[in-house]
Image: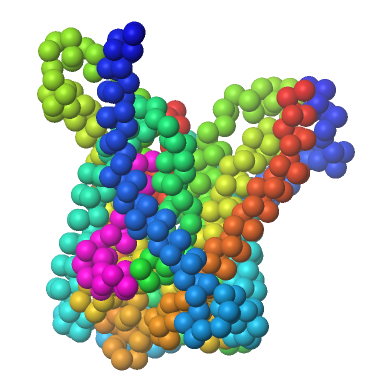
Amino acid sequence: MATLNQGAQPGKAVKQHTPLPERVWKVLVWGATVFFLINVLLLIATVAVNSVATRWFGTLLPQGFTLHWYAQAWSDFQLASVLWVTVEVVGAVVILSVLLGVPAAYALARVQFPGKRFVVLVFLLPLMVPPVTYGIPMATVMYKIGLAGTLPGVIFANLVPALPFVILVMTPFIEQIDPNLEAAARIFGANTFRYFRYVLLPLLVPGMLAAGLLVLVRTIGMFELTFFTAGPGTQTLVVALYYAVFSTGVRAPQSIDAMAMIYMAITLVWVLIALQFVSPTQIVSRVKEQKR
Amino acid sequence: MNTPALSPPLVARDTKGWLVAPALLFIVALFIYPFAYGLVLSFQPMNGGGVWANYVAFFTDTSMWPTILVTLKLAVPATLINVGVSVPVAFALRRSSPYQKLVTTLLVIPVTLGTVLIADGMLTYFGPNGWFPQALQGLHLYTDEVRLTHNYWGVLISLIVSGFPFAFLLTLSYVTGIDPTLASAAATLGASPWQQFRRIYLPLLVPGLTMAACLSFVQAFSVFPSAVLLGAPAGPTRVMSIAAAEAAFESYDYSLASCIAMVMGFVQLLVVAGMLGARRFFYSGPVTGGKG
């Protein structure tokens, strides 16, 4: 009580009795939020409208509508092969990151071993250092050993941020599984394999699902690392989109936006699926949201 | 001679600790090694010269060293805006409500879509004939020609569109992590919302906000696709990542590219260390004072 009253500046104490500045402030905060959201939604709507426009120049809405650009984009950008590469890369990254990440998370959650703090630091670094900074030395090494431009090269590059992400999502998840379950299973005669198969694995599945979905959403949109390491035949959808936007003028802008819509549809479907299992905060960071 | 009794559990521990090895090996091979390789390579200039030739070239070439300033000029305002605005918005949405759910879900969209798609949408939406300039002129808010793409503002806006949701979701997770009963107690003692924020939330938020600011800055500092697509990559928005990518993938000077990447990492490290140091310097007082 004493601290609060002493600390309050005289000017601020007045506000306590006049709710008007408070109301103005509230309107300001909400106004800014709504303004931002409306602009983001309109920005996306622009892409959607342009992708079905016949001709659109300086008017509110285009002159006519057509679905022809989707067919055009499909052949212009060889989307069939690009999409297949994307599926291969994202699928491999999700599977490999979970396969490699869950055992590592288990070790970090359950076992004390020398140098554990150092190991945790090594796993944290790829999430702290931005992809552009480490992507260039990584691409250099990959070009040197001939891995760049190949499908495994792109998969490995995308695994670098995905694997630590899985580990950091799974470690607290495994920590909250009761270790007494293992003792109980052993007492009933389960060997390590049976304990893993019938006790641990069923408990791990929800966490693995969440981690896998988060990695999936992040890998579809991962631009820099794929851009640095992909060759002409190993571009994922987001890199193909970048090249299309980069060389605007070569293709009709509506065709580019049709491809953008395909990219957006794929991403948003997976985001909606992911949001059934994880909180929005988990998509951007490993911060665990408090349950309330 | 009592070691046999002790050794079985120790052996069991060690074998489980090895579960971390595959993941650790992978990160060392594809993250730590390339980083070390890049660091060494940056001291081995492609065109000969001394050990420091690349760094000397970088800091004397007028197409190189100003990129640091250009990048800072984009990243610092973007970080300040993103973190600065997300604090009041997250504070307004701190209680679990349908609004909170709606806003967080909508804000996940720009984060997951990624900078390439945002850049594509912004080119049309903020372009000379887009909806945004049309609306400004229709409402007579701004009568001159609106130029928001292919310059500094385009890149800054794109950094806000993708960076604000990121900073907000992080900040929200920190705000919701603070026990609301603390603020209720303060309110019972007569603290206004502003005083609750200033005296209860802010001191508890400082560590989280510093983290959010660091991550936002690092992300903004490594801006790449939007600086190319929405900016003027030859001039006002020639950021460090463009210079590095050009050196690596256009002039195939991996040594110089690694040097630029190292300088980039170093500047990021410097700013992050500065922010962490500033937190300790400025905010250690109020936190302890609040408890007293």
- Horizontally, residue B254 falls left or right of residue A158, namely right
Residue occupying the point 40% across, 58% down: B33
Vertically, is B141 above or below A116?
below
The location of residue B182, given as percent across then percent down, is 63, 25
Residue occupying the point 16% across, 82% down: A75
Depth check: B6 or B80 in front? B6
Magenta highlight range: A142-168
- Horizontally, residue A166 falls left or right of residue B130, namely left
Residue B140 seen by the camera: no
Vertically, is B212 above or below A178?
below
Residue A46: say if magenta.
no
Vertically, is B171 above or below B51?
above
The location of residue A267, given as percent across then percent down, is 28, 60
Q: How many marks?
A: 0
Residue A160: say if magenta.
yes
Residue A255 seen by the camera: yes
The location of residue A209, given as percent across then percent down, is 24, 41
- Residue furthest to the front in view is B1
Quadrant of residue B141 within the rendered picture: bottom right
Residue occupying the point 61% across, 54% down: B272
